[in-house]
Image (spheres, rainbow, N blue to C red):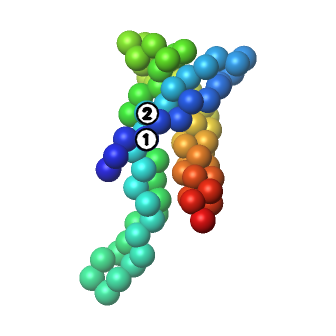
Amino acid sequence: MKEQILVTTIGDEIDVTVHFDYQPEEEETHNYPGCDSEVTINAVYVGGDEEKDIEDCLCPATIAMLEERCEQMLIDESEDDR
């Protein structure tokens, strides 16, 4: 998996850079159960400073929102490629 990067904002306009991995959905076959797509956040940096990873400080709702934004970014990119 190639690490992806998303630049976005959280809270009261806090700029963050999200480093994440993406596992695309895989179809079920006769000998493989398949899997859903999944975003795994590796780090969340404040203001581009890659020394301040705040992922462990974020609440589960914020992590879920960032995961959704990461997946949406990939969807938007794939639509742009068409």
Direction from residue 72 to residue 38 in the image, left or right: left
The image quadrant that residue 16 belongs to is top right
Residue 64 visible here: no
The image quadrant that residue 70 belongs to is top right
Q: What residue is pinned by disc 2?
A: 19
The disc labelled 1 sits on which kind of residue?
Answer: Gln
**Number of marks:** 2
The residue lying toward the viewer, choosing from 34 and 19, is 19
The residue lying toward the viewer, choosing from 80 and 59, is 80
Nearest to N terminus: mark 1 or mark 2: 1
Find residue 13 and report its horizontal and vertical position in percent. 70, 18
The quadrant in which the C terminus is found is: bottom right
Q: What residue is pinned by disc 1?
A: 4
Direction from residue 65 to residue 26 in the image, left or right: left
Real-space CA distance between mark 1 and mark 2, rounded to the nearest whole angstrom: 6 Å
Q: Residue furthest left?
A: 31
Residue at image point 54% right, 15% down: 47
Residue 80 visible here: yes
Residue at image point 64% right, 17% down: 14
Disc 1, disc 2: CB below 8 Å? yes
